[in-house]
Amino acid sequence: MENLEAIKENASTPLFDRDQVKTSIAHIGVSNFHRSHQANYMHDLIEKHHELNYGICGIDLLDSDRKTYNVLKDQDGFYTLITKDATSLHKPKIIGSIIEYFFGPENPMAVIERLANPDIKIISLTIAEDGYHLNEITGEFNQKHPAVAEDIVNPFNPKTVFGYLTQAFKLRKLRGLLGCTILSCDNIKNNGDTMKQSFLNYVEKNEPDLLPWLKNNTTFPNTMVDRITPLTHHKDLDTLKNDFFIEDQWPVVCESFTEWVIEDNFYNEKPNWEKVGVQFVKNIAPYQNMKLQLLNAGHSVLGILGTLHGYKTVQEAANDTDFMLFLENFMDLEVAPILVKAKKIDIAEYKTTLISRFKNPNINDSLSRICSESSAKIPIFILSTLNIQLKEEENAFNRIAFIIAAWCKYNDGIDDQGNHYNIEDSISNTLIRMSALSQQHPLKFLEIKSIFKDLSSNILFTTKYLKYLNYIRTHNIKESIINFNANLI
Ligand code: CS2
């Protein structure tokens, strides 16, 4: 990425001088999603509206992020964003909003110092569902998680975001500095409140003297973030090189749809994000629930059912009319009726757009990405709907029971074409074992308490679940879906 001049013809390159941009956002978790979403909003804000105060300092904390670290270091933080619609590939865009980059495993003290620097007004996060170390059903922070336990013993060489933030805020307090806004951008219900609860819980146990200061000097707005961002394929590197003469070691691919809604609860001044399409709202719940329970849940449904059939991408499953009928009925009959309505939201329109997004033939979003860490996702995306159904005695959860039964079978790791696939999940051993045991004792899978709590003793649910599990185990998934759709099961 050394020579932006040379690629000007084939890509849109930043129209601003990066030396003029100050860094006031530290972002932890420089994932593909961060790079297609927040970093792109910041790029537009700097470029189109000359807000030069809001450059990003990217920070990664995990050893597994070494690749991103090396690429961004080599490319001075620049990377290519490739936007793919159903019918067109946009001109590649070189994003220039990541001004600095720090890598925790290499120099944890440098990260702590950067986070403690008063220039940093916002610390934003994409640390994925499992990075919050929560039991999603009880909602409690898991102090016993091995990474958390390690940070408690070894506070100056932290591994988790909680360990890093604690040290950084201790320095801010000690130096008489101001606090800042902590902005979670993950697909977690009440992501800001959840982050707050986890972090304060961690601090209360491990640095109780910091707690009162922290409560007065931080805010945690809730957010809804949305842009489908698949994993980058080697093919994307080749296309860039062959068709656009751009050599980028790790570009980011995404759809053109993008949405960001943020609760207006900032500790200090905030960027004028509304200029680039961000919505600030008082109550995030209707936006967040709609997105998590329709889009993310829809992804998981296609992911689990599609993988069982042998499909590899979201678009393959979404273009199968039997799978899509099942999904649409799930959305219309089981999710939409229990979503809280809000004036500015049109659920039907959201759903229609969503279906065309899922069908985008160019995006190549792999089902393995969708299904990874399902043990953290399913409680947020799908069991949340079931819990409301059960609480409100609506009992429209036939499809949810079917999906959970299919997820049990999914953990056998073999599709209907006889091909094996990996279960990529931090609790894959438990999932695989309980799924195997459920061959003999069908309720076994539901006994994973960290996911299902006491669902295995809910007769209303288990009656349906057992019926579908038995059917799915003795028929292939396509036939099961067809017969389900036809009311034959
Ligand atoms: C996906 C999300 O991880 C998943 O299961 O549903 O990454 C999804 O693509 C994004 O939330 C879209 O905004």
Image (cartoon, helix red, strand yellow):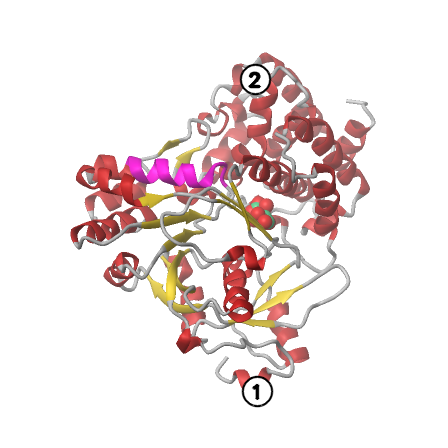
Taking 18 as reference, is 155 left or right?
left
Number of labelled discs?
2
Q: Residue at x 48, y 83 (%)?
A: 2
Q: Seen from this angle, which residue lies furthest top?
A: 459
**Is 15 located above or below residue 185 in the figure?**
below
Amino acid identity at mark 1: Ala
Q: Is residue 369 visible?
A: no
Residue interval drawn in magenta: 188-201
Q: Residue at x 38, y 69 (%)?
A: 22
* Residue 6, horizontal then vertical, whole percent: 57, 87
69 in the magenta segment: no
Label 1 element class: helix
How far apart marks 1 and 2 lie (CA) works out to 61 Å
Query: Disc 1, disc 2: CB below 8 Å?
Result: no
162 and 286: which is toward the camera: 286
Which of the 4 image quarters holds residue 362? bottom right
* Residue 435, horizontal then vertical, whole percent: 55, 31
- Mark number displayed over residue 391: 2
195 in the magenta segment: yes
266 and 327: which is toward the camera: 266
Find disc 1 in the rendering and name its residue.
Answer: 6
**Is 217 located above or below residue 65 in the figure?**
above
